[in-house]
Amino acid sequence: MFSKLKKKIEAFLNNEDLKQKIYMVVYDTDTHWGRMFDVLLLSFIVVSVMVVILESLSFFPPSFRLFLTVLEWMFTVFFTIEYLLRLYCAPKISGYVLSFWGIVDLLSTLPTYLSFFFPAAHGLLTIRIFRLLRVFRVFKLFSYWREGEILLDTLKASSKKITVFFLFVLLMATCVGTVMYMVEGGMEGSSFYDIPSSIYWAIVTMTTVGYGDITPVTSVGRFLSAVVMLLGYTVLAVPTGIVSAQMIAESNKKKKKAIPCPHCHKPGNDDDAEFCKYCGKRLDEDGESPAEEEPIITMDGEIK
């Protein structure tokens, strides 16, 4: 009995025809059924996120909350089956599991099961909203996707600069907080009880948030507060400039890479170029290479 069951399971796992059919529906958006499946999936994602948000409201009656819970479990079962089907028909299982989509798909189903042990984990279901990024692939909005790639490349390229700047701001906040503790600490009515609280105040003030829970009471402390506030406006402008400059550079780089020569097929030509800088031929398919000037023979027999 077990041997027959084992053979059936092996036959199911090695059924390439069935895998191909499921793949055409689950992964391929160019087919009719694949497009219908993705549209249905996106609809379920939107509704499931709305259900999670509504479940957090306390004024609904118990009967309606039970209805929301049943809906949530229905969506979870659907997403679990979908995840298993993607694993089943994936050309390389590890490639899908470790990919961005695979991680998001897994995290969109786990919170419901984890809520049995950790009730607070149920709120993590809102991570399903990241699955809506599939809309770019389903409706062929690749131009928007390419813009997103430029943004990601920009953040990667400027990550070291931003990290150094972040460390500088952290050191500056620590120094300012320590100075404020030396000025305000021990004063009557002061809220600067210790250095960590003073560092917290420096960060809140430098980022121009200003909760107002900790305020200086001395004239020197207020003067330092004004300096930190003005410094905060300058500090906030630096990472914006870093990212903006890098984004312009990445955008220009993408433009150059996007124009290959139709003759030698080498990329890297400028977007306003008429001739290829490698082979010299026109970038227009129907164009011809620039005409060469005929040599001029002088009276002395020299060629110019």
Image (tube, rainbow, N blue to C red):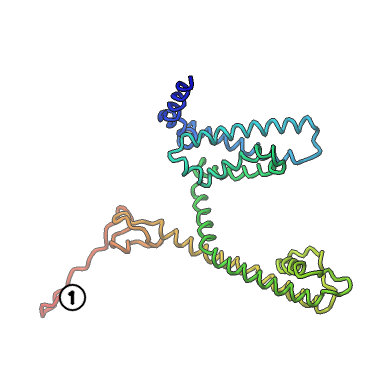
At 48% across and 61% down in the image, what residue appears? 250
Q: Position of residue 241 (x, y in %)?
A: 58, 68
Assess disc 1: are there few (<14), some (14-19) or many (≥20) residues with their C-alpha within 10 Å of its C-alpha.
few
Locate residue 295 relative to residue 79 in the image: left or right: left
Asked where in the image residue 196 lies, by quadrant, the reply is bottom right
The answer to whether residue 47 is left or right of residue 9 is right
Residue 274 placed where, x, y %?
A: 35, 61
Count the marks.
1
**15 or 158, nearer to the observer:** 15
Q: Secondary structure at mark 1?
A: loop
Q: Nearer the viewer, residue 232 or 255?
A: 232
What residue lies at 48% left-to-right and 37% top-to-bottom? Answer: 27
In the rendered image, the residue lying farthest to the right is 188
Identify residue for label 1.
304
Q: Residue shown at 76%/76% (left/top)?
A: 224
Query: As shown in the figure, which amino acid type bears the numbered disc 1?
Result: Lys
Residue at position x 66%, y 32% in the image: 73
18 to 139, vertically: above or below:
above
